[in-house]
Image (spheres, rainbow, N blue to C red):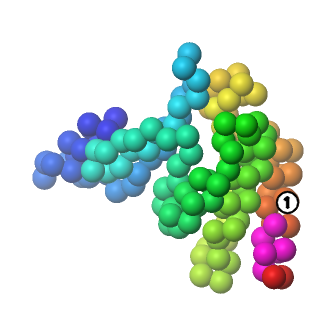
Amino acid sequence: VAGMMHAYTLYWYVRPFGASALMASYTSDGPQLYTVEPSGLSHRFFAAAIGKSKNAAKSALEKLDLANLTAKEAVMEVAKILYMQHDPNKDKPLELELSWVCDASNRLHQLVPADLAAEAEAAAKAAREAMDED
């Protein structure tokens, strides 16, 4: 995939990709997460962020103990990080869509169950409001 994205930046007759991508899989080696950039660079990470405010999100992700988090705990933390980085005065309204690849999803990419997503969003909004009050 990275090679194809890089090739599209080289030739004038094809339109280059204009966005980075996150790719996740679950193999016999365990879960794997890759970032792929339009330039063709690809890296494997335990946690990654792309897009606006990616540096602040990466810093927040680095503070998490990823080796000991369950998938449900990780969903809660990611929702909090997304809401903490969102500025409602400058940014468009936040629409939170969560998906995962884990044992709970039978190692397939699926949307996070609606009840867990709602719980994570409520916790994230509460954390954001607590931060705004300080």
Q: Which residue is rendered at x = 68% and y = 29% of the image?
A: 102
Question: Measured from the top left, where is residue 58 in percent x and y?
Answer: 55, 57
Mark 1 element type: helix
Q: Residues within 10 Å of mark 1 (few under 14, many from 20)?
A: some
From the top left corner, tell me how far across and down residue 46 is, in percent: 55, 40
Q: Main secondary structure of the magenta part?
A: helix
Q: Which quadrant of the figure contains the N terminus?
A: top left
Residue 133 in the image: state x and y as whole percent: 83, 82
Does 101 appear above or below 112?
A: above
The residue lying toward the viewer, choosing from 63 and 125, is 63
What residue does disc 1 label?
122
Q: Position of residue 13 (x, y in %)?
A: 14, 49
Residue 71 visible at all: no
Amino acid at pointer 1: Ala
Is residue 37 something that shows in the picture? Answer: yes
Residue drawn at (74%, 59%) of the image? 80
Extreme residue in the left direction: 12
Name above or below for residue 22 compared with residue 108: below
For residue 83, which quarter of the picture? bottom right
Q: Residue at x 15, y 49 (%)?
A: 10
Q: Magenta stretch: residue 114 in it?
A: no
**What count of labels does the image hold?**
1
Left or right of 19, for residue 8: left
